[in-house]
Amino acid sequence: MFLKLSSSIASDPIFNKKIKKIPQSQSLLCVLSWFDTVSALVSPDCRIPYCDPKWFGESSDIISTDKMNGCPVGMFRVLYDLCIYRRKIMILFSQQECYLQDMKTNYKLLMDLRDRCLHYRDHVLFILPHGSSFTYIDRLKCAQLWSLSAVLVTLQLELHYFAKLNKFAEYNRDMILGSEFPDAVPTVHIYSEKATAIITEFLSVYNTIPSSSPIITQMVWPIFYVAICSSTDENRTECWKALKTLYETVKMGTIKSNMDIVKRVWDEGCSLESILAGEGWFEAGIDLLPC
């Protein structure tokens, strides 16, 4: 509710014109847009962010996500588009039927989003025009970590929604009935070898950055989602250690809530969406804020 209300106020043309002249307000808008996008990315109703993606700034601006948390604006725009895609695909699989061509088109869109994630280097400026407390290597690692966690989202979407796509195509099906669709929103978490490889890469980079670095203390959603997707004992141990260290460093209750959710996914094998759609979260009008 807070994010929706804040975005609604900030979107007012007169108000927006005034806050553009106040640096502190621009910084607040940047942070709100970052929080809103991450919250939308895990929302069980697959909502679209309330914010305007322009609020991320531009990497060359005085105020941008590059300056605020080290993650380039271009990467946040990919996350924003991934939120829109989640909404679109949920609606597609909520229908009574759909054309196979629509499934193929949406599968290609998902692969395009994954490619944009994997090209994270393209978004990282070697030198930020207005300076930064983060070095180029810091920002490059930051972009890599955010991109890898986003790739995991695309993997989950692929495994859940498109597992039968090749079978449908093999039989030259034109129309697919709703009864043959997977659930519009995942109820179980799917683990894969490809995801394990991505997680192992993520942790190897994550562990090269000091735990007290703002790059790490502001990188809540990536390590949270990587932990959710972890299936091996080794990776789960590494993720839990990272989450505990993060909690001990920032002492934020949201981290503790995130850890409880991770534990439940590991123990029950359920999806993040199924937890957040239940009692105490979406049913109570509460969004998870993993940031």
Image (tube, rainbow, N blue to C red):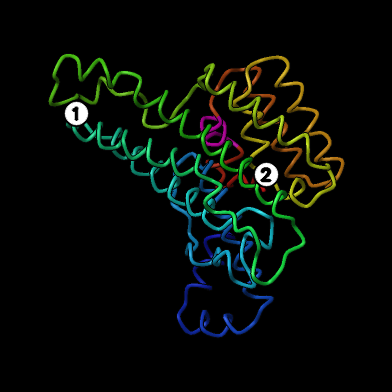
* Front-most of residues 154 and 15: 154
Residue 237: where, in percent of width, then height?
76, 21
Q: Secondary structure at mark 1?
A: helix
User: Contact, CB < 8 Å: mark 1 with mark 2?
Assistant: no
Left-right relation of 215 to 169:
right
Left-right relation of 153 to 69:
left
Number of residues whose C-alpha sits closer than 10 Å to that of mark 2, classed few (under 14), some (14–19) or many (20 or more) = many
The relative height of residue 71 versus residue 102 in the rendered view (above or below) is: below
Ranked by sequence position, the earlier of labels 1 and 2 is 1
Q: Which residue was labeled with disc 1? A: 100
Q: Secondary structure at mark 2?
A: helix
* Front-most of residues 199 and 245: 199
**Magenta region includes residue 39:** no
* Front-most of residues 262 and 238: 238
The relative height of residue 138 versus residue 103 in the rendered view (above or below) is: below
Residue drawn at x 62%, y 73% as measured from the top left: 26
> In 3D space, how far apart are the residues under numbered discs 1 and 2 (Cα atoms)?
39 Å
Q: Amino acid at mark 1?
A: Leu
Residue 122: where, in percent of width, then height?
52, 51
User: Which label is found at residue 141?
Assistant: 2
The relative height of residue 215 versus residue 192 in the rendered view (above or below) is: below
Q: Amino acid at mark 2?
A: Lys
The relative height of residue 110 versus residue 198 in the rendered view (above or below) is: below
Residue 163: where, in percent of width, then height?
35, 20
Residue 250: where, in percent of width, then height?
83, 48
Bounds of the magenta segment: 272-279
Q: Which quadrant of the figure has residue 260?
A: top right
